[in-house]
Image (cartoon, coloured by chain):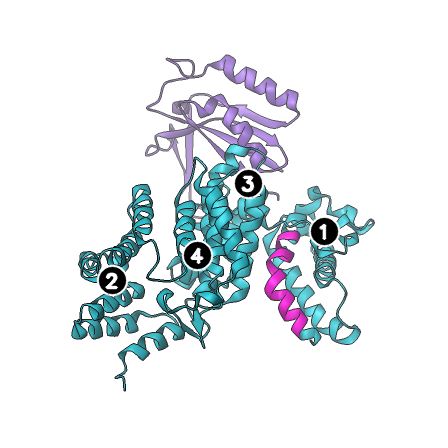
Amino acid sequence: MKYVLLLMGNHDGPRCGEDEAPGVEDFVAYDRELQEAGVLAGGFALTDPEDATTVMLDGRGSEPIITAGPYAESREFVGGTFILDVADLDEALRWAAKCPGALDGRVEVRALLDL
Amino acid sequence: MTSDDVLARVHREEHTRLLATLVRRFSDLDLAEDAAQEAMEAAVVAWAERGVPRQPLAWLITTARRKALDRIRRDAGLAQRLARLHVEQDRVAPAAEDLALDADELPDERLAMLMGCCHPALAPADRVALMLRFVGGLSTAEVAQALLVPVPTLQARITRAKKRIATNRIPLTVPDDPAERERRLPLVLTAISLVFTEGYDATGGEHPQRAELTAEAIRLARITERLLPDSAEATGLLALLLLTESRAAARVDDGVPVPLEDQDRGAWDRRLIVEGIRLAERAAAMPDAGRFAIQAAIAAVHAESATFVGTDWRQIVALYDLLLALGEDPVVRMNRAIAVGRADDPATGLELLRALADEPELARHHPYHVALALFHAEVDDDEAAAAAWRRALTLADNSGHRRFIQARLAPRG
């Protein structure tokens, strides 16, 4: 069963590596741990959320509305993901609890939809 | 006994066990429910034609597993979802459960279901609903009554929880981590006690007692106690249920409840009392003794007393004080007031009861008005007593309670 760990950050929180927040080396170590356990099935780290571009449609067939930056009303953003291939939710939750992204942020665990 | 009678008994006593076994096997509540239902339907025909099998439960499990596999074969999407669970292997080799013919040797998966239903990934409000519905064997309407929510709300909760379990593959198992088991235990014990209460004093219908539910709750409490023998609360709950059950034969007369003071104590089950007292004493001596251990101690004081008037009411008041120290609870307050009324005098008990009149939970709790009526009568205020009886009558939720109250409202002579 595949689960994605969505590493949620907050615009008001410390940046990666700042203060006591986990730094790049923490994520690299975690990545290695997942690989060694044979549960890593993908994932990606993302650039800063303020560099995002948002696309919205005002209805079917309408012209796309393109805005610079993330959806303005949200203070939360996805900073990166890990895709895990594990037996069940308990195993996914055990890995999520070890994820550096759970410090000073939160990790949302979602099962992948099997299409 | 006809095959239909046997089937009805097996359905009553073993349906949740059949369901738990299927959930364990297929990790899919809907599939398990459908397969169990189909197996029951198949049994109606097969048992009437060929006689009841020697091990009805084993027969039902085998048949239901076959029905589930048939369904998986027909439904490609389902097959894909379940492929990782290695159900494929079953098609060639029979699993161990098929060979174990003795029902007692079949693994009992109900505790795994109970613990699984308390998974932290499930919404707290959904957990008890799932336990009562799928392990307690209560109908949707009964669960709604027990949890004081409308039936559609309850149905929505169950649907939502089932979807969450399936979508996220939430394991319905006993956690390996002892600390996690401890965390889930209080809710498991609460659910078991609610099943017992529903059986002991049904919310609806014509039968105030439903023996299959009290028996089921005691079985579940035994399994839990066996798994966690060092838990004061698991031990306390089992003691409490056994001591309460020991009065079963004396507490109802022709469908009408008999109050503790009028019960024939000779009809109390000594065997259950001996076991219950032993467990209650063990629970009380453990460091984490909580509300079930204390309630078991209260039940033990009643069980040890040869007469109602000879009951050690002071000790019972002291135990209610311990319960209140764990948390404020209007029903416990009410019971303490009644005990004070016996330990001191009815007027003092009545005063304490009347001080609770503004508690909304008690205002619609018919035993509160029954207690008021009894104490008003004891201090010779017949008018107030009659008013309290009438109020109790409008709130009583089964026919036994109504008949009990009507008998006291009716003019004597």
Real-space Cα separation, disc 2 to disc 3, in angstroms: 39 Å
Disc nearer the start of the sequence (3/1)? 1
The answer to whether residue B15 is magenta is: yes
Q: Which chain carries label 2?
A: B
Q: Residues within 10 Å of mark 4 (few under 14, many from 20)?
A: many
The answer to whether residue B301 is magenta is: no
Real-space Cα separation, disc 1 to disc 4, in angstroms: 34 Å
Tell me, by letter, which chain the rendering colours cyan: B
Figure quadrant of residue A72: top left
Q: Residues within 10 Å of mark 1 (few under 14, many from 20)?
A: few
Q: Quadrant of the N terminus of chain B?
A: bottom right
Which range of residues does the magenta coloring cover? B5-21
Question: In the image, what residue type sits under mark 2?
Answer: Ala
Question: In the image, what residue type sits under mark 3?
Answer: Pro
Task: Name the element at disc 4.
Answer: helix
Q: Are tags 1 and 2 found on a single chain?
A: yes
Instruction: Judge whether residue B160 can be spotted in this image.
Output: no
Q: Mark 3 lies on which chain?
A: B
Query: Which residue is depicted at the point 39% across and 17% down?
Result: A15
User: Which residue does the numbered mark 1 point to in the structure image?
Assistant: B105
Tell me, by letter, which chain the rendering colours purple: A
User: Which residue does the numbered mark 4 point to in the structure image?
Assistant: B303
Real-space Cα separation, disc 3 to disc 4, in angstroms: 23 Å
Q: In this view, does B58 lie above or below B172?
A: below
User: Which residue does the numbered mark 2 point to in the structure image?
Assistant: B363
